[in-house]
């Protein structure tokens, strides 16, 4: 079994509120279907979640009742994106079940406190593809906080020990510097997990928001002796190739 | 706190697939909002769930992989109805969180085996209205089975000991005979739970599908010393009156 994370910046237009990239979603789902692999699917929230979560400062936890509106609208928007992904899976004959993290995850001061993955096991045992996503969840210290898709991927990996993990992002992989700022940035093609740049060392990981945290998550997964492939979801067939074991352009983080 | 169940036959057109009665939903939500009561909301699946669940024989459990399509489409349709309810709540300023039973309920041979209501507690503690609904769930013996809204109401009642439970249906209440077939059927206005007709005794409870099971659930709730009001959701203000303690036309089952 393979765990796939479809990044929010691939499946949504991050600059425009609630704009799904439906053609990209359909192509990626079709690549998954074609590979015939058993998978667990995790997706990001992209502009369906981040814009509202930021507006209502949901990442700071529950401070005022004004935020309840933000909680409702964030959760509701992410569900709309999830429904688009679910419909695409259905249209490709991949019958699936949506498992929102709010009912199986609890955080404590922004750290995962508790996760119950039985419903994933049960889905897999009858042949349904489990699907989850980054969203707002309850937090026993803060009232609520954000559980990212990356945190879900890490915990699913620890529990299910997948054959590999594939992170589908909007870059060719992990670079030694920020490729959006530095022309001489080099793609790290193959790297042992303990050679990954750290958030402290690398300017790149500091300025691109998600990448710092993402690298920490990759390191944690690879520590479990699981290979992590980071590939560009905007390039046709890189996900497909990675699923069937072809060496695609991207970053291959060697676990162990 | 009051637990309200909006019946599937009130909020959907039961004869037509995936047809929500949006105006009725909006009116009922407006009545809830106007009462200013803290509530937990449960709703039925109506024609969003039953038609597909029947077509794919989901109530018999997992027998063949053809049913996985039925599982996906049932769950997906119920989510669409739930989204309509959630949007109505939002539009009336009732900020809410949708808690699908698939991730907090497990059945065993069609009986509830396990239910985790922590996410309801957490919702209430920060001021969000928890919303759940009848749906397909996992079953450790059958693969999957159906968890009805009524079973959710019963278990939420046992856990939260609400001030009262209000079941909103498409009849004036519980009758001594089937009111759809017998002109002389009499509405039971006030009744002790142990005087309720049993499924064996009453023809009414045998022929109307849901009513037999519903009466058993009402008896179980009332045994916990909780009053249950059964009111007609098609009649304006009966839910509102029942919420604020007015004696509306309907059946008042006295708990204790």
Image (cartoon, coloured by chain):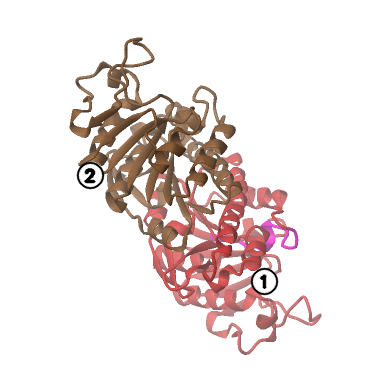
Chain colours: A red, B brown
Residue that mark 1 sits on: A173
Asked whether residue B146 appears in the rendered view, the answer is: no
Q: Is residue A11 magenta?
A: yes
The foreground one among A145 and A162 is A145
The foreground one among A240 and B220 is B220
Report the number of numbered marks: 2
Among the 4 quarters of the image, the one containing residue B253: top left
Residue B210 at x, y = what percent? Answer: 35, 27
Residue that mark 2 sits on: B225
Considering every residue shown, the one lying at the far front of the view is B246
In the depicted structure, whether residue A147 falls above or below residue A132:
below
The chain letter for the residue carrying disc 2 is: B
Judged from the image, the secondary structure of the residue bearing numbered disc 2 is loop
Look at the image and tell me in which quarter the C terminus of chain B lies: top left
Q: Is residue A43 magenta?
A: no
Residue B159 at x, y = what percent? Answer: 29, 52
Residue A39 at x, y = what percent? Answer: 50, 54
Crowd rating for badge 1 (residues with CA inside 10 Å; few <14, some 14–19, many 20+): many
């Amino acid at each position: 079994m393979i765990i796939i994370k479809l990044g929010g910046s691939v499946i949504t237009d991050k600059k425009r509120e609630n704009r799904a990239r439906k053609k990209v979603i359909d192509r990626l789902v079709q690549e998954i279907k074609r590979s015939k692999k058993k998978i667990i699917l995790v997706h990001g929230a992209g502009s369906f979640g981040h814009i509202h979560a930021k507006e209502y400062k949901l990442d700071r936890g529950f401070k005022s009742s004004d935020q309840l509106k933000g909680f409702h609208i964030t959760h509701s928007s992410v569900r709309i994106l999830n429904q688009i992904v679910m419909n695409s899976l259905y249209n490709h004959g991949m019958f699936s079940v949506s498992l929102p993290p709010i009912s199986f995850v609890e955080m404590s001061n922004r750290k995962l406190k508790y996760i119950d993955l039985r419903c994933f096991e049960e889905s897999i045992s009858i042949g349904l593809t489990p699907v989850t996503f980054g969203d707002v969840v309850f937090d026993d210290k803060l009232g609520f906080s954000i559980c990212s898709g990356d945190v879900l991927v890490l915990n699913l990996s620890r529990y299910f020990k997948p054959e590999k993990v594939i992170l589908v992002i909007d870059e060719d992989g992990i670079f030694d510097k920020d490729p959006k700022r530095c022309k001489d940035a080099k793609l790290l093609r193959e790297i042992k997990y303990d050679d990954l740049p750290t958030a402290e060392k690398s300017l790149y990981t500091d300025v691109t928001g998600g990448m710092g945290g993402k690298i920490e998550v990759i390191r944690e997964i690879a520590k479990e002796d699981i290979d992590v492939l980071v590939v560009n979801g905007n390039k046709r067939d890189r996900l497909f190739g990675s699923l069937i074991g072809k060496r695609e352009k991207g970053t291959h983080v060697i676990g162990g």
